[in-house]
Amino acid sequence: MTIKRVAIVGLGLLGGSVGLAISECLPGVATTGYDADPEVRRRAAERGLAGTVCDTPAEAVRDADLVLFCVPVGAMEAAARACAEALPPAAIVSDVGSSKASVGEALARALPGRRVIPAHPVAGTERSGPDAGFASLFRQRWCILTPPADADPAAVEALGQFWEALGARVEIMDAAHHDLVLAVTSHIPHLIAYTIVGTASDLEDVTRSEVIKYSAGGFRDFTRIAASDPTMWRDVFLSNRDAVLEMLGRFTEDLTALQRAIRRGDGEALFDLFARTRDIRRSILEQGQDDARPDFGRADHADR
Amino acid sequence: MTIKRVAIVGLGLLGGSVGLAISECLPGVATTGYDADPEVRRRAAERGLAGTVCDTPAEAVRDADLVLFCVPVGAMEAAARACAEALPPAAIVSDVGSSKASVGEALARALPGRRVIPAHPVAGTERSGPDAGFASLFRQRWCILTPPADADPAAVEALGQFWEALGARVEIMDAAHHDLVLAVTSHIPHLIAYTIVGTASDLEDVTRSEVIKYSAGGFRDFTRIAASDPTMWRDVFLSNRDAVLEMLGRFTEDLTALQRAIRRGDGEALFDLFARTRDIRRSILEQGQDDARPDFGRADHADR
């Protein structure tokens, strides 16, 4: 099966990047787009995030071979219901949400009998909205498909090829396993970044101005992550609750052990952990999953 | 008083950057350098991290107006003792350590009656060693001086001007307050980064290879920080124990509250925090303390 027409529902960072990536990498594929916010639709049309920006979800999906829901995971079900009647029966239905078991259930409830194949491109930035997207967002990033057990292999194949055409590498796994993996590689990192930034804002003995001035000691990295879209992240934590709580339990156990080592002056335990964690960074760089330059090649050192 | 000759003891990321910054910003100032590791001395001489790289600490400090200890904070006292006899009585003694109360005490013990003015340039990268330094490291970063109550104002002034000449902005504060501020803007961020990277490495139900592949979801940012020098950071936590434990207590309280919000499905509490933390990022960018481009302007998006 061939994908010739893609409908993008939700034109923020992810939806907009999909549209731009299609026009760059798959110029023969037509795109339609819809967003519930008229201001976002206006801006999406200006930036050309989709070939046609439609005023209703039904219009956007009417002739699509692939419908991609690019809305916060808590909004997936309502967005899918709004498209249900107009959706062509043979269309592949997918999404870009950061949790997969609950999204798979929501889409299946809203669109019974349709070809639902949930997916998650592991890519993004701290920006959001129709001005945030760019065509190269998915390049060299992984896109995880979580097809249900009875999914049509041809549809899974076509969706995988679509993401590969946008520059991504594709992996297939079980939705529950996806949710556990992403809890540790994405959800818990966001949760602790939001927490420490909140803790620092609320101190009385250290002023906000001091926190900002001396943020180059490490804190500023966390503020980038904690500037991510609040609605998207609220929905991620609510929809992936069990895996997040499980991983959070392990993290706090480990943190308590380090706290004890500091209290007891156990330098050896600290050193052992700190020496061990360098290896993972090395592997991430070797596999092209981050910028190898110090400080991510940040601009303040770019002139060196 | 004028600083015409600077001795740098310890030629890693910080010491090496000081030497390179002096030769770029203060070409009239002579530098001598020493490192306990002969291999580091060899490499420092090759890179020109100091005008003269000496084979003993005594030689390095003999005619210095300013001696800067750039070693892990746990090694400060021994490094200072090794220089005590050769140190000119009028020389300013300072350092670049990340905790200040304990370093101030260590230097005062090793060099009684000398002009000790502890300092901390809040700058660095995840790299370490004699190849890691670069001249622009301190540009636009803050350097905090923590002079003891009886410090000579002329010496404090001279040290401040020295750091300003290297591109830094200078602030003066009490050592105890410094240690509290840096606990939250630097030490706790490093501790939780080391912890989550350790937690992720030790999982059984998620493989190391999965953690690496899907690190672009947020985790990779933490691995950068957790690749920092293990000896340096062990010493920071041991030397700033009380402030670190105090701030860690507040962080875990806040994390527990978020955990409860997730367990109860309290989306409002999550959204409120996540929306609030964006402001601090905005202020950090406005004050030039981080790169404003998405993802710090990382190379994988540099072609957009």
Image: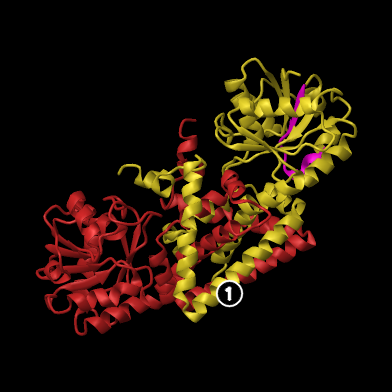
Chain colours: A yellow, B red
Residue occupying the point 12% across, 63% down: B5
Q: Is residue A70 part of the magenta span, yes or no?
A: yes
**Residue A12 is at least partly visible in this image:** no
Q: Nearer the viewer, residue B151 or B251?
A: B251
Q: How many marks?
A: 1
Q: Amino acid at mark 1?
A: Gly
Quadrant where the N terminus of chain B is found in the figure: bottom left
Q: Nearer the viewer, residue B3 or B214?
A: B214
Residue occupying the point 46% across, 56% down: A278
Outermost residue toward the top?
A: A28
Residue A9 sits in quarter:
top right
Mark 1 element type = helix
Percent of width and height locating residue A42: 66, 28
Q: Is residue B275 part of the magenta span, yes or no?
A: no
Residue occupying the point 89% across, 27% down: A85
Q: Which residue is mark 1?
A: B249
Above or below A200: residue B87: below
Q: Which residues are magenta?
A: A65-78
Residue A161 sits in quarter:
top right
Q: What crowding class fits label 1: few (fewer than 14 Cα within 10 Å), some (14-19), or many (20 or more)?
A: few
